[in-house]
Amino acid sequence: MRGRCEGRRWRWVLVWWVLAAAAAAVVVVEGFGVPESELETFRDERGGLVALRDALRFAGAQAKEIQAREVEHRGDRPHRRACAVRGGAHLRPPQQEEPGVSGDIKDKAEQAGNKVSGSGSRSTESGKGAAELQFFRPEKASFGLDELFQSTAEMLGKGRLGITYRVTLNAGPAVVVVKRLRNMGHVPRKDFAHTMQLLGKLRHENVVEVVACYFSKEEKLVVFEHVPGCSLFQLLHENRGEGRTPLSWPARLAIAKGMARGLAYLHQALPLFHRPPHGNLKSSNVLVAFPSPPGGGRRQKHGGDSDAAPVPKLTDHGFHPLLPHHGHRLAAAKCPEFARGTRRPSSRADVFCLGLVLLEVVTGKVPVDDDGDLAEWARLALSHEWSTDILDVEIVADRDRHGDMLRLTEVALLCAAVEPERRPKIHAVVRMIDEIAAGGGGAGACAAVSSTICREKCIQF
């Protein structure tokens, strides 16, 4: 009798053990997806665990169906996050964003807790550890980080440095441009703050002003002034064909002159250890504004022969020292010495990039990523005396200025020399372009420019 009771007790214990194992297996199958082959290895000769496997498979399917219904039910509920305010959704992850989509720069506001020390900072929260923007001019500290995150933002595009937004503020200046930096998670706060202090002090007509910055471990933002207009790349290459307003030669020459002056200022203003001073010079990083003519008339679209010359402004400058492991992503990596790995880029790398942009202005062609393909093509054309064939079709009809166009081409080729030592210094480039702009195509001016170019070709480095 006692033996039968003992047997029944152990059978109940075994039943409870099997039920507990089944529940645990449901969790394992549901949460981690145990493959069928592993269950097969536990099969015994009587097939007991095979039946258990079939039961678990059915239970897992039922659990997944219930979970799917719950997810679908949650998806129908309205999204109540505080970041969806003032007519826009919060900023989406970078891989999901598209140019021209409006939203709010808000998704990192709750995570921000670090400060960037410095004068002109404005806190958006009270208390210790509040997130702050660091302003470089106290008179422009008219908005805070919270206002920036809650303002409507339109994505302008993605670049090697990060994603750029045009932000319409609810207070302070009407519009600013915010760049969310990428590949800078390794940058220490001290290095970032020091670099931004240098860039925040720059003041020049042909350089975009850095208004403020923000640093945290997860997020690094730079606030620039808004330049009404578009990039040089857009002016030269977008919407080619019928109905396009071409960029005239006087406008192109004024843009070349302003670019050289802005780059010369960067080379003079930034310290010697900050090399290359720009590091990312290309036509998409040259913003062009066309000022309104006197008397409040309509703003010129693409320039002309009037007195209101376009004003170029260099942007995305000065970040190369913060990217020692990602410098190959920037425009300075196009210079031959960087590609060969023989030396670190210097100020002459910026001169090389300027030469490519000047060739782009004259020819209307986009430089390729390989070393100096556009420069080699232009050199070949000039050596075979079919030089006018390199001119952009939109300006080739202006025959009276062919001489100036070809002289600017020679200056560009000097800048794009393969050996860094053969490239002129940026102040010499400014002088040569000024002589071209001041000459107006006259014979005396042509001789002066040619003599300057010859001197630069024979310069002792």
Image (spheres, grey):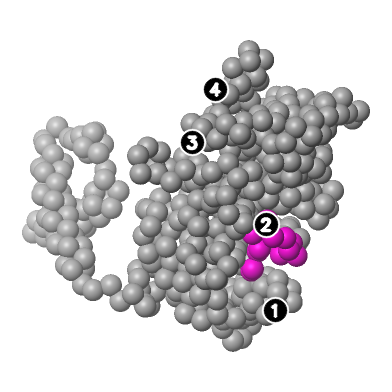
- First in residue order: circle 4 vs circle 1: 1
Instruction: Name the amino acid type tagged 3.
Output: Glu
| Residue drawn at the location 23% of the way across and 33% of the way down | 37
Percent across and percent down for residue 384 are: 63, 13
Instruction: Name the amino acid type tagged 2.
Output: Val
Q: Which residue is mark 4?
A: 389
- First in residue order: circle 4 vs circle 3: 4
| Residue drawn at the location 70% of the way across and 31% of the way down | 407
Q: Residues within 10 Å of mark 1 (few under 14, many from 20)?
A: few
Q: Which residues lie in the magenta part? A: 200-212
Q: Is residue 321 above or below residue 121?
A: above
Whether 314 is among the magenta residues is no
Q: Are marks 2 and 4 in contact (CB under 8 Å)?
A: no
Percent across and percent down for residue 349 are: 73, 37
82 vs 157, nearest the viewer: 157
Q: Is residue 171 above or below residue 176?
A: below
Instruction: Name the amino acid type tagged 1.
Output: Pro
**Quadrant in which the N terminus appears:** bottom left
Could you say whether the residue bearing mark 2 is in a helix, strand or loop?
A: loop
